[in-house]
Image: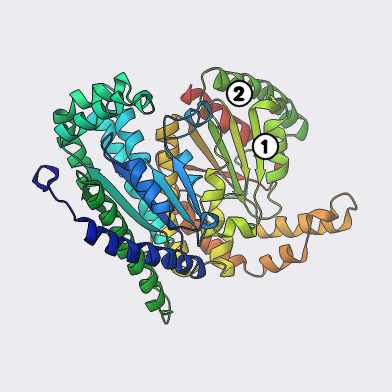
Amino acid sequence: MLEKLDLTRTVDDKTFNESLAGYKERLSVLQRMLRDQKIPAIIVIEGWNASGITMSTQAIIQSLDPRGFTLHSIDRPTEEEQMRPFLWRFWIRTPSRGRIALFARSWYTRALSDEMQKPAWKKSLAKKIRSINNFERQLSDDGTVIVKLFLHISREEQKNRLEERERNPLTAWLVTPSIWHVHHHYDESLPVIDDFIEKTSTGYAPWNVIEATDRKYTILNVYSTLVKNLEKAVEGAKEVKPKKGKPKELVKPKKSPVKRSSTPEETRSKEDYQQTLASLQIEMLEMHYLLFKRKIPLIILYEGWDAAGKGGNITRVARYMNPLGYDVFSITAPDPGEKEHHYLWRFIRQYPKAGHVAIYDRSWYGRVLVERVEGFCSDAEWQRAYQEINEMEEEYITSSGGAMVKFWMEVSKDEQRRRFQQRASDPLKIHKITDEDWRNREKWDLYDEAIDEMLARTSTSIAPWTVIESDDKWYARVKALTTIIDSTRALL
């Protein structure tokens, strides 16, 4: 595709000046419309070295209200970013509703730069392509408009521009040996970039390739492309009408291989469980130090019925772990700022660094549990969440080299009632029981159905669910720690 472009295109001064003024005014108006309609927008500017990325970025921001956009100039990852999965630093920079995020280089440059240095780069780059497409699709499904621009110049034009920069003392520092190295491999890189563009140009985030030899032609086409895409987004938002009825139901999953039971597989004395638990806690400390030493991250995730014992279980798991190496996140309803982002955003921000452990007391599965049952999201949103969650977990594990241990804590309805009543009568525990807990019991059957579907659709080979039979809290604590230790040992 790139080889077929006409790189000799130019525009005369009169056309440039007349057209640019109109585009600038329109882009300013569109920014306000995006804000008013709460539409988040991502603008990606990629291209060859010296193709005009900085020039195009400067041209765009001249027409934007600085209070409504954020510019991200992407370079090599920082030490902090290197300790996270590949897409983490881009996820946390995605815009809230009504704002624009402008990326001068992005996940595309990083994917190519990082992967092409590896021996089996073609295979690893294919994984990055899949991750990028999933990432952009998830954002698009959530209402984000994504405009991607690639500035294309010839090898000869790039050489001329690099030499021109070197002759200028003010810009010579921009031309490094690594940039010349890439230039010398222009011909080998061209088909790779061409293929990369083709495989990441989708209906929800297509590429717009711009012939960038003539600077005026480049700027004019950057503006026209932006205006065209943003107009389509705001007009599309106006035309969207509430659909009557429910969206098409998902095909019912086959019977879940994850068996649910609240009754322990064995019964031992409390003293026996406590003795076993003490030994496991020492072993967990050792596993924690090994994870830290080898820079391997771990997520431990707890979901379960109210009063199933999640808090007590987490306390026992973390009791002897080094507090500098783990975090516990108790998940509640999203705050107003978090609601302005994709629902996964607030969880991805909390990903553990390499060598650290993140423990979630409830998690992103709220989308297909409480948000589904209580109607806090649309049917379409919770139905597509299964795929989004599976993709997110796979990306985290494969990209970080870490692991994820997921627990569903099952308790019987009778045992839950007993624990509720005990909490209500104990001054030290009464804060744990609320009117909402009692109301949720009235929807037991709806939650029961949602749990079954969640386990069936999201227990994968790479991130399986483990059911903890929680009618006996001490048994549950021992099983959880044993499972974490076994998983960690296998990982190590």
Q: Residue furthest right?
A: 427
Using the image, tell me which numbered label, if any, was put on residue 288. Answer: 2
- Going from N to C along the chain, the mark reached first, 2 or 1, is 2
- The residue depicted at 59 percent of the width and 55 percent of the height is 338
Q: Amino acid at mark 1?
A: Arg
Report whether 253 appears left or right of 8.
right
Count all numbered tags in the image, as a single digit.
Answer: 2
Q: Is residue 326 above or below residue 420?
A: above
**Residue 245 percent location from the top left of the image:** 43, 80
Q: Residue furthest bottom?
A: 244
Residue 208 visible (yes or no): no
- The residue depicted at 69 percent of the width and 24 percent of the height is 322
Distance (Cα) linking label 2 and label 1? 18 Å
Q: Which residue is mark 1?
A: 477
Q: Residue furthest left?
A: 4
**Residue 77 percent location from the top left of the image:** 45, 30
Q: Residue furthest front?
A: 14
What is the secondary structure assignment of the residue under circle 1? helix
Q: Nearer the viewer, residue 277 or 327?
A: 327
- The residue depicted at 38 percent of the width and 67 percent of the height is 26
